[in-house]
Image: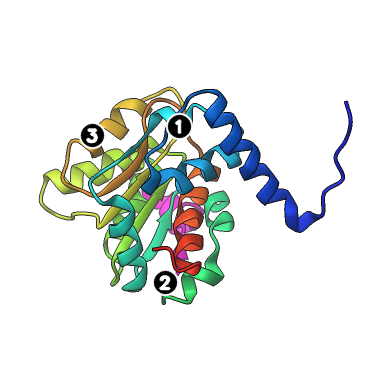
C-alpha cells in the first residue's frame, strides 16, 4: 500500500474528509445539528457504528454549550478522560475538569462502605459549588449512582455524557439516565470509553471556539 505524506496540521482535516465520504458510501445519514460531534466520535474510534448508536436528549448540544458558557465544571470518571479534555479552552469560559477516582480518601471511603470509587466520586461531585457536566466513559456505577441520587431527590445533574464501555450493567445504566429528564448525550449499547467521553466534550468546546455554537 502507498503511504500518503501529509503535513501534521492537515491530518485531522483529511481524516474528517474520509469520514464524511465513508458515511455517504455507507448511506449513514446523521442529523446536521449533531454531525460534528458524531464524526469526532468516529474519528476517535474509527468505528462507524457511532453514526447509528449516539443518542441525544432534546436540544442537548445547545444546553451543554450554554452550561459551559455559564462556567460549568466537568467531572470525569477516569484520569484518561481528564487528560484528554481540552482544559485550556474550557478555562476560557471559567470551567475546570475534575476526577476524584484516584484520590486516597475516595478509595478509603469506597472500601469502608463496600461501594465503588465511582459511587463516592459522584457523591463528591454533587457537592461541588458549580454546575457540573458529568463525562462518564468507564464506570456504569457512576451513572447508576447519579440515577439513585436523582430518584431520592438529593441531586439532579445539569448534564450527563454517558458512554461507559463494557459488559456488566453498561446498557442498563445508560438507559436509566435516558428515562429521566436529565439532559444527556449517550451512546446506546456496550461501546464507549474515556476517549469517547473526552471527544464529546472537545467536539462541543471546539465548535464553541469556532463560533458555531
Pinpoint residue 148: horizontal percent, then vertical percent. 19, 42
Q: CA distance from mark 3 to mark 1?
A: 22 Å
Of the numbered discs 2 and 1, the one sitting upstream in the chain is 1
Q: Of the residues tagged 3 and 1, which is closer to the observer?
A: 1
User: Is residue 37 found left or right of 62 in the rendered image?
Assistant: right
* Residue under the point 24% across and 49% down: 183
Residue 190 belongs to the span the image colors magenta: no
Asked where in the image residue 187 lies, by quadrant, the reply is: top left
Colour scheme of the rendered structure: rainbow
* Residue under the point 29% across and 46% down: 184
Of the numbered discs 3 and 2, the one sitting upstream in the chain is 2
Q: Secondary structure at mark 2?
A: loop
User: Is residue 66 found left or right of 111 in the rendered image?
Assistant: left
Of the numbered discs 3 and 1, the one sitting upstream in the chain is 1
Of residue 39 and residue 97, the one placed in the foreground of this image is 39
Up-down relation of residue 103 to residue 96 (above or below):
above
Pinpoint residue 120: horizontal percent, then vertical percent. 34, 50
Badge 2 local density, few (<14 within 10 Å), some, or many (20+)? Answer: many
Find disc 1 in the rendering and name its residue: 51
* Residue under the point 37% across and 40% down: 31
Find disc 2 in the rendering and name its residue: 95
Q: Pick the quarter of the image with the C terminus.
A: bottom left
Q: Secondary structure at mark 1?
A: helix
Badge 3 local density, few (<14 within 10 Å), some, or many (20+)? Answer: some
Up-down relation of residue 48 to residue 145 (above or below):
above
Pinpoint residue 133: horizontal percent, then vertical percent. 34, 58
Magenta segment range?
A: 95-114
Q: Is residue 124 visible?
A: no
Find disc 3 in the rendering and name its residue: 176
User: Is residue 38 found left or right of 110 in the rendered image?
Assistant: right
Q: Is residue 73 visible?
A: yes
Of residue 38 and residue 80, the one placed in the foreground of this image is 38
Amino acid at each position: 500500500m502507498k503511504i500518503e505524506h501529509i503535513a501534521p496540521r492537515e491530518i485531522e482535516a483529511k481524516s474528517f474528509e474520509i469520514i464524511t465520504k465513508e458515511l455517504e458510501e455507507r448511506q449513514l445519514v446523521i442529523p446536521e445539528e449533531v454531525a460534528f460531534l458524531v464524526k469526532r466520535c468516529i474519528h476517535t474510534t474509527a468505528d462507524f457504528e457511532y453514526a447509528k448508536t449516539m443518542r441525544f436528549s432534546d436540544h442537548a448540544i445547545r444546553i451543554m454549550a450554554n452550561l459551559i458558557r455559564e462556567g460549568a465544571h466537568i467531572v470525569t470518571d477516569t484520569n484518561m478522560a481528564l487528560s484528554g479534555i481540552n482544559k485550556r479552552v474550557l478555562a476560557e469560559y471559567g470551567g475546570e475538569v475534575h476526577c476524584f477516582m484516584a484520590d486516597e480518601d475516595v478509595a478509603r471511603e469506597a472500601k469502608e462502605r463496600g461501594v465503588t470509587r465511582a459511587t463516592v466520586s459522584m457523591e463528591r461531585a454533587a457537592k461541588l459549588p458549580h454546575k457540573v457536566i458529568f463525562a462518564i466513559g468507564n464506570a456504569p456505577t457512576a451513572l447508576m449512582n447519579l440515577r439513585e441520587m436523582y430518584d431520592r431527590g438529593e441531586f439532579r445533574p445539569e448534564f450527563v455524557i454517558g458512554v461507559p464501555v463494557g459488559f456488566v450493567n453498561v446498557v442498563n445504566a445508560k438507559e436509566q439516565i435516558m428515562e429521566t429528564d436529565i439532559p444527556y448525550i449517550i451512546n446506546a449499547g456496550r461501546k464507549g470509553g474515556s476517549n469517547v467521553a473526552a471527544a464529546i466534550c472537545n467536539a462541543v468546546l471546539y465548535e464553541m471556539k469556532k463560533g458555531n455554537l
